[in-house]
Amino acid sequence: MRKSTGQDNLICRNRQAGFRYEILEKIECGIVLCGTEAKSLREHRGSLEEAFARIQDGELWLCGFHIAQYEPAAGLNHNPLRVRKLLVRKQQLRKLTPNVQQRGLTLVPLRAYFNERGIVKIALALARGKSQHDKRQTLKAREHKREMDRAVRRRR
């Protein structure tokens, strides 16, 4: 199998995560998939826009990750929005559990990608929701940076 480099290995990313949430910590997880899901992801047919993770019965689950059906599979396809199990070490899970349950933080998937060995991984973030004021500040900072970049380009 050919090793992919650069952006080739990115399946999808959650563009709104950085705007809606303040990212506190990032972890990498494996994901349990069936055959048609893996084939569909090889065609970059997944979406993390409405996805979130939760801890239930001592296991980590990914909800809302939409993986489009694999057309050649016909009647043997998967449910596009089924809940999928995430694979993390017990030590990491024990560290995350109190933060999510007591401090009111959320587990948000940032991106799905293939690692060097061609295995699907999910970059998961421990995040806190931003208030409307924080979102406005983010927009102002982004606009200010854009204006500065434009001014630098004009000057050259």
Image: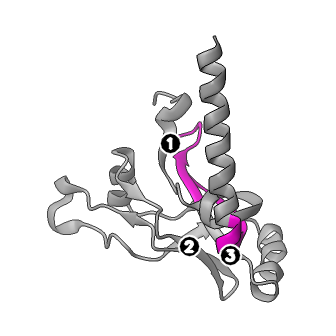
Q: Secondary structure at mark 3?
A: strand
Residue under label 3, please give it.
106
Which quadrant is the N terminus positioned in?
top left
First in sequence, mark 1 or 3: give its number: 1
Q: Nearer the viewer, residue 48 or 115?
A: 48
Look at the picture and state if 138 lies above or below 59: above
Residue closest to the far top = 156
Gap between marks 2 and 3 measured at Cα:
8 Å
Which numbered marker is on residue 43? Answer: none
Q: Is residue 15 magenta?
A: no
Q: Secondary structure at mark 2?
A: strand
Q: Residue 35, percent across and down?
A: 36, 58
> Position of 70 compared to 34: left or right?
left
> Position of 87 compared to 48: left or right?
right
Whether residues under marks 2 and 3 lie with C-beta atoms below 8 angstroms apart, the answer is: yes
Look at the picture and state if 150 lies above or below 137: above
Q: Which residues are magenta?
A: 110-134
